[in-house]
Amino acid sequence: MTIQNPKPKIQNRISPAYPLVLPTWIVLGVFFLLPLTILLVISFAQRGTYGSLKPIEDFAQYVRSGKILANYARSLHPIYLQIFWRSVWMAVVTTVLCLALSYPAAYYIAVVAPARRRNFLLGLAVVPFWTSFLIRTYAWMFLLRTEGLINRTLLSAGLISQPLELLYNNFAVLIGLVYGEIPFMILPLYASLEKLDLSLLEASADLGAPRSSTFRRVTVPLTMPGIVAGIILVFVPSLGQFIVSDLLGGARTILAGNLIQNQFAVARNKPFGSAVAFELTAAVLTLLFVYTVYTRKKGQDVLL
Amino acid sequence: MRGRGGFLRAHTWLIYLFLYAPIAILVVFSFNKATQTAVWQGFTTEWYGSLVHNDLILTSVRNSLIVGVAATVVATVFGTLVALALGRYAFRGEGLTRNLLYLPIIIPEVVIGAALVTFFGVVGLRLSLVTVILAHVVFSVSYVAIVVRARLSGFDRSLEEAALDLGARPLQTFWRVTLPLILPGIVSGTLLVFTVSIDDYVITSFVAGVGATTLPLQIYSMLKVGVTPEVNAVSTLLLLLTVVLIVIAQRLQQPPPEGVRD
């Protein structure tokens, strides 16, 4: 049961809401928006010696010569394009795998399982959602490494004579990503499937539709909001991933997140790192903008 | 129908096996006598014992607790206030506030970390536990605001009106009626935010200076050097802590059954 509280209309006097939101505005303004703005400005600068910024002597000349966009131009070099491309397809494969694995599970929890077990089953999906991503990634490192359990087991079973190279490749990163992101897919799918009106499925069956077309033409369209939310919730963090690719991947599995971190921590080229950071942010925000337009059109409630 | 249900059930349990088995194996091997290989060589609690004598780990645990508590307290107060404002008033900048609260959760952690470390450099703030706390407050406020706001949407305003009609002052109404009703939401938000803070690696790795190593940073650097049973032991303890907090938070988030009064 939800109680609708009609909100008072906006009045001309100062709303009592402002003292309540002011502390957060200040915190997020100073320690979030301002830092992002500085980062954006720096993305147009050039690196000086020792990782500092090169002073700009003639600003007009700096703009005219195109140097102002040099970092963005550099990010289009094939080396970096390859990294972006890898980030995108890794995120796509992760999202597809998560969706394919999660939909049947969410369907079972929300529709098939006895009602009294639903909370327990859902709880099992929620706990990993909040538990340490770092440790969950480490768990796979522990399993996949040369001295790890999988290699040990295969060796002692005599199935292999040499340990397999399971770690530090795309395969390991994909496992880590799917493993880490699956809960983010199950939860929105469940939320959608739970609201599914089962009588519509019965109606479809009564009218002679085979199960597969009921699924395709009734179930999937009705749960599309959950599917889209899940895709966003998995795709966006996968795109900006750092830990999984750093721990389970090798030199050839660098993703956009690792490239940014590297420019700040190792290469000391903050301007270039900032430019890449903004390209990533722009990609993420575009996706979310499209998503917001989609949910508005469907008239769904958003989180806040 | 039965056949399909059986398949779906088996599939679901396989997914849960996939989700829980790696963690379970990690926990089991924190009790393994062997130092290097993943071969079971007998039960021991020796790695937990050696944690107590590992100064690096103890310091990092202390740092994590300081950061977690400080960031959580600030974020809980600020986040609750924002949630109250969003829940009951229409004001100019309302939509802007909502979007602003989403951003720290949406924007990749690497970007936030890079922005903050650059900002601290520009304003000349030396990296320390303080910078870590500030960074954690940024993302924590959003989590608290979302959780508390969700709780407010099921809130019965007539209870407050009744209190006011009966002559209670607004502040009195807040302390005696509003706060007790939304308290479960606040506590649950607090616990969630504390877990997120205790777990955070990416943003912290950017803004933690020398001497501000938190537990995840310590675990990470141990992993980079080599996998030891000690890492499994400390990971197990961290997992245990977060799972306990999450289960409590989940319990609190579910609204009490209707008709039940305290």
Image (cartoon, coloured by chain):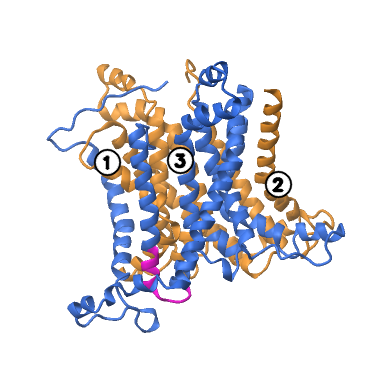
Chain colours: A blue, B orange
Q: How far apart in space, not on screen, are marks 2 and 3 (Cα)?
A: 29 Å
Q: Position of residue B94 (x, y in %)?
A: 26, 40
**Same chain letter for marks 1 and 3:** no
Q: Give the vertical position of B236 relative to A62 (above or below).
A: above
Task: Give me the chain letter of mark 3.
Answer: A
Q: How far apart in space, not on screen, are marks 1 and 3 (Cα)?
A: 23 Å
The amino acid marked with disc number 1 is Gly
**Same chain letter for marks 2 and 3:** no
Q: Nearer the viewer, mark 2 or mark 3?
A: 3
Q: Nearer the viewer, residue B223 or A72?
A: A72
Instruction: Decide if residue A101 is in sight here.
Output: yes
The amino acid marked with disc number 3 is Val
What residue is pinned by disc 2? B21
Q: Residue furthest left?
A: A12
* Left or right placement of residue A288 versus residue B252 in this view: left
What residue is pinned by disc 1? B95
Q: Is A251 in the magenta? A: no
Instruction: Describe the element under mark 2 as helix, strand or loop.
Output: helix
Q: Which residues are magenta?
A: A265-277
Instruction: Describe the element under mark 3 as helix, strand or loop.
Output: helix
Q: Position of residue A219 (x, y in %)?
A: 52, 29
What residue is pinned by disc 3? A228
Q: Quadrant of the N terminus of chain B?
A: top right
Q: How far apart in space, not on screen, are marks 2 and 1 (Cα)?
A: 43 Å
Q: Position of residue A214 (x, y in %)?
A: 55, 26
